[in-house]
Image (spheres, grey):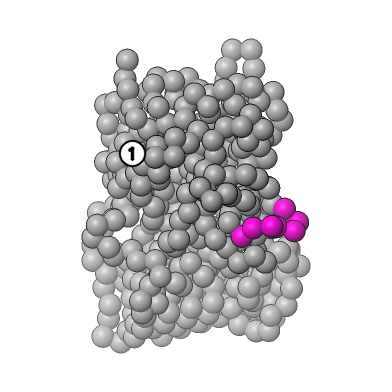
């Protein structure tokens, strides 16, 4: 029988609905980040850098792009005969066929996959966070404390703690209480959704709670194990960790990459972030271009001006075009004399000549004021924007649009255009 010390289960089925039009056709872990990467590259790279060579990736919502990106795991050195990366979508079983209904339910439905590796420990990860972490150090900590479960935790500002699962610990860091998203948190030590379980403990809890609806780690598995008096410890992490769950945090995390001394460094030799990249020509920057404090990815053709922005792979920026404080994802075309400010523009978009995006006062979104906020203009993938129109802030566009969609050639702040079949 195959024997692995620790295998990883990476939860990557989330819709990421708070990213609006960016995730209308793909799972959140497949969204582009930092020019050439996708969000899932970070936990996958952490695995291989930490010596974890067996990873099950659990997909569900719009998995096509994610599956194509992961492939057989070559970029992460996870194309192994034994172990490697395996994509695990929900599948039909004899007697019933069901979607994953919660984080723990997704793991429960893949007990057979985990069983075959006879692993002593199982690492549970989320596919939608940006961070670098050595899981081997966390495993050593887990063994030293003879823990049944170790939860990676980090201190957060107390006013934000109610968004997380919060833990209270004793002097040894053993968890004495666990509260899932408490209204009045008594601690600022937040669970990062990264767990190491002894396989026997995890298996027991999954089987015992298999009939629990929407079975979840924070709400069900951890409280169940706590009641059973399992040894649960907090592993404190103090590095960079970002949940890019909202358009605002996603934009901020990208902008942090271009700081003079970035808090999160993509260029470290000893902890590389790997990705599935096409072989592309180098970028071309014309003599008329101006580029200031930006990331420009491979295969770009830049003839305009770019300030404080992250430009993805294969982007074309025409003459006289100006990009400021924006994220432009791969293979997008920005035509001559366009002006783009504080915007997120997804993949394969065409922005017409002389069009201005992100201009005007901040007005609440009429589509969803919680999602389309932060003063950003957001344009979904494969959208087309005609020439010489003006688009305001807190706007959302998805689909091929025409001049007739813009009264007086304008889409005011807070307005949206979502073409039929786009959402």
Tell me if residue 108 comes above or below residue 51 in the rendering: above
Quarter of the image where the N terminus is located: top left
User: Which residue lies at the image location 65% right of the left edge and 84% below the top edge?
Assistant: 360
Q: Nearer the viewer, residue 364 or 202?
A: 202
Q: Nearer the viewer, residue 85 or 206?
A: 206
Q: Nearer the viewer, residue 77 or 294?
A: 77
Looking at this view, name the residue that lies furthest to the front: 171
User: Which residue lies at the image location 29% right of the left edge and 26% below the top edge?
Assistant: 82
- Residue for badge 1: 52
User: Which residue lies at the image location 74% right of the left edge and 73% below the top edge?
Assistant: 364
The x, y position of residue 172, in whole percent, is: 51, 47
- In the image, taking residue 311 as reference, residue 387 lies left or right, namely right
How many numbered marks does the figure carry?
A: 1
User: Which residue lies at the image location 62% right of the left edge and 44% below the top edge?
Assistant: 176
The x, y position of residue 194, in whole percent, is: 50, 45
Q: Secondary structure at mark 1?
A: loop
């Amino acid at each position: 029988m195959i024997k692995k010390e620790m295998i990883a289960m990476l939860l990557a089925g989330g819709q990421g609905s708070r990213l609006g039009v960016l995730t209308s056709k793909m799972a959140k872990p497949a969204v582009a980040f930092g020019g050439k990467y996708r969000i899932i590259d970070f936990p996958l790279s952490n695995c291989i850098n930490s010596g974890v060579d067996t990873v099950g990736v659990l997909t569900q919502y719009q998995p096509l792009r994610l599956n194509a990106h992961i492939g057989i795991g070559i970029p992460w050195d996870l194309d192994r005969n034994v172990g490697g990366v395996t994509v695990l979508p929900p599948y039909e079983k004899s007697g019933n066929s069901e979607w994953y209904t919660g984080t723990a339910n997704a793991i429960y439905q893949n007990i057979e996959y985990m069983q075959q590796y006879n692993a002593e420990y199982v690492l549970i990860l989320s596919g939608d966070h940006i961070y670098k972490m050595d899981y081997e150090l966390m495993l050593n900590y887990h063994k030293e404390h003879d823990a049944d479960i170790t939860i990676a935790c980090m201190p957060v500002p107390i006013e934000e703690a109610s968004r997380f699962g919060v833990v209270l610990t004793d002097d040894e860091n053993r968890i004495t209480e666990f509260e899932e998203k408490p209204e009045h948190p008594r601690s600022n030590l937040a669970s990062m959704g990264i767990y190491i379980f002894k396989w026997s403990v995890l298996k027991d809890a999954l089987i015992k709670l298999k009939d629990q609806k929407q079975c979840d780690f924070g709400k069900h598995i951890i409280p169940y194990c706590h009641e059973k008096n399992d040894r649960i410890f907090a592993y404190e992490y103090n590095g960079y960790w970002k949940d890019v769950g909202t358009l605002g945090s996603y934009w901020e995390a990208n902008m942090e990459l271009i700081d003079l001394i970035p808090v999160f460094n993509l260029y470290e030799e000893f902890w590389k972030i790997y990705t599935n990249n096409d072989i592309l020509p180098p970028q071309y920057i014309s003599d008329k271009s101006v580029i200031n404090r930006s990331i420009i990815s491979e295969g770009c053709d830049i003839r305009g001006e770019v300030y404080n922005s992250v430009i993805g792979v294969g982007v074309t920026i025409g003459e006289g075009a100006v990009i400021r404080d924006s994220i432009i994802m791969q293979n997008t075309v920005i035509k001559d004399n366009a002006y783009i400010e504080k915007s997120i523009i997804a993949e394969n978009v065409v922005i017409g000549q002389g069009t201005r995006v992100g201009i005007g006062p901040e007005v609440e979104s009429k589509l969803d004021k919680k999602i389309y906020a932060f003063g950003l203009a957001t344009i979904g993938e494969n959208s087309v924007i005609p020439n010489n129109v003006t688009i305001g802030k807190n706007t959302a566009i998805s689909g091929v649009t025409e001049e007739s969609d813009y009264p007086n050639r304008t889409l005011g702040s807070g307005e949206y255009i979502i073409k039929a079949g786009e959402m």
